[in-house]
Amino acid sequence: MRQKLRNAALALMLLTFTLAASAEGWFLESAYLSSRHQASTVWSGQFTALNGVYYDASEFYESKRISFSGNLGLAFLSDQSAIYIPLFFDTGYESELYSASPFVSVGAVYSRVFDNTTISVGAQNFLQLGGGISESPCVDAYQREFHCGSGLAWSDFKKDAIRRVEYPRSLTLRATIKF
């Protein structure tokens, strides 16, 4: 299974490098791949109930498929300007009780040189697609629903407590003057 993941990651890197290298002025500035899901924090499934009893429901949160994520940085350089495009992607996560859809985040930075001044304008994570999370409850012997990640009654579990990693959007404007 790890071999399949390595092969898929290598194929993605080679495809990205080929696409970036084939256009004049474009190149792959950075690449990072991980064999882990990173766009959200998956529950461990281990908790201590209100009565003090420890439970281990971790098998319900084990991944059913290969997950990986990564960062790519594409850059275009010319004599007077540069464009940098950072890209983060995550293939999602799928277990019996926790599901996260694939996620992509893209930014862009444009820099231009004027004599002794460089102006840069950028937007980080301005386009974010996917990343939706859904969870399902466990059911005890009395047919009561509860959250297996925290041990809380399902009705008390706050759905907004879902643990998505935040990729904040930001705008930057930078001027550099060389004396």
Image (cartoon, rainbow, N blue to C red):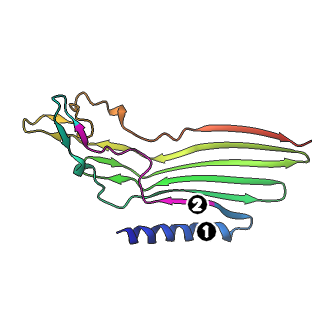
x and y, in percent, of residue 161 in the image: 36, 33
Q: How would you classify the magenta stretch by its main secondary structure? A: loop
> What element does badge 2 sit on?
strand
**What label sits on residue 112 in the rendered view?**
none
| Screen quadrant of the N terminus | bottom left
> What element does badge 1 sit on?
helix
Q: Mark 1 is on which residue type?
A: Phe
x and y, in percent, of residue 136 in the image: 24, 42
Question: Is residue 32 highlighted in magenta?
Answer: yes
For the magenta stretch, what is the residue range? 30-47
Residue drawn where x is 64% and y is 66% of the image: 20
Question: Is residue 111 highlighted in magenta?
Answer: no
Which sits in the foreground, 4 or 81?
Answer: 4
- Residue that numbered label 1 is attached to: 17
Distance of label 1 from label 2 (alpha carbons): 9 Å
Q: Mark 2 is on which residue type?
A: Ala
Residue 76, image quadrant: bottom right
- Residue that numbered label 2 is attached to: 31
| Screen quadrant of the C terminus | top right
x and y, in percent, of residue 148 in the image: 23, 40
